[in-house]
Image (tube, helix red, strand yellow):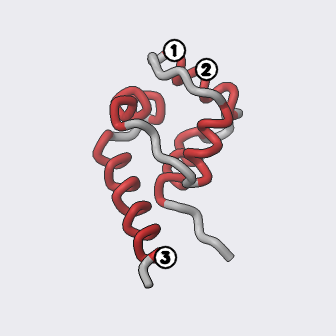
Amino acid sequence: MTTQSPLSALLRAARGRRTQDEFTAALADAGVVITRQALSAWERGVVVPDPAHWPQLAGVCSITVGEIADAVVEQRRRLAAVRAP
């Protein structure tokens, strides 16, 4: 069983009941234009959002840039631990 990445948990909690399309529309209103497929990749932990977008993402999610940064650092730490020999 896989556990949800810290960033995934943060984004999904922030998205709440909004669909991916609704959430990406809210991000677009804040100046971050992404597809729902890109959002899905963020939520699955495949990629992380560009740090240039973190302030707008934080505003839409009602979280801090620090919370995003902490989640990204933790996600990268976990990935490194999995990949380590």
Residues under numbered marks 2 and 1 in contact, where contact means CB atoms less than 8 Å apart: yes
Look at discs 3 and 2 and give the one toward the viewer: 3
Residue to which mark 2 is pinned: 25
Residue to which mark 3 is pinned: 82
Residue count near mark 1 (Cα–Cα under 10 Å), binned few <14, some 14–19, many ≥20 = few
| Vertical position of residue 45 compared to residue 64: above or below | below
Q: Of residues 48 and 16, which is closer to you in this image?
A: 48
Mark 3 belongs to which amino acid?
A: Val
| Vertical position of residue 40 compared to residue 56: above or below | below
Residue at 71% in and 33% down: 19
Residue to which mark 1 is pinned: 29
Indicate the position of residue 59 as horizontal and vertical percent values.
40, 29
Q: CA distance from mark 2 to mark 1?
A: 6 Å
Per the rendering, the mark at residue 57 is none
Residue count near mark 3 (Cα–Cα under 10 Å), binned few <14, some 14–19, many ≥20 = few
Indicate the position of residue 80 as horizontal and vertical percent values.
41, 70
Mark 2 belongs to which amino acid?
A: Ala
Indicate the position of residue 15 as horizontal and vertical percent values.
58, 39
Residue at 48% in and 53% down: 7
In the picture, the quarter occupied by the C terminus is: bottom left
Give the quarter of the image for residue 49.
top left
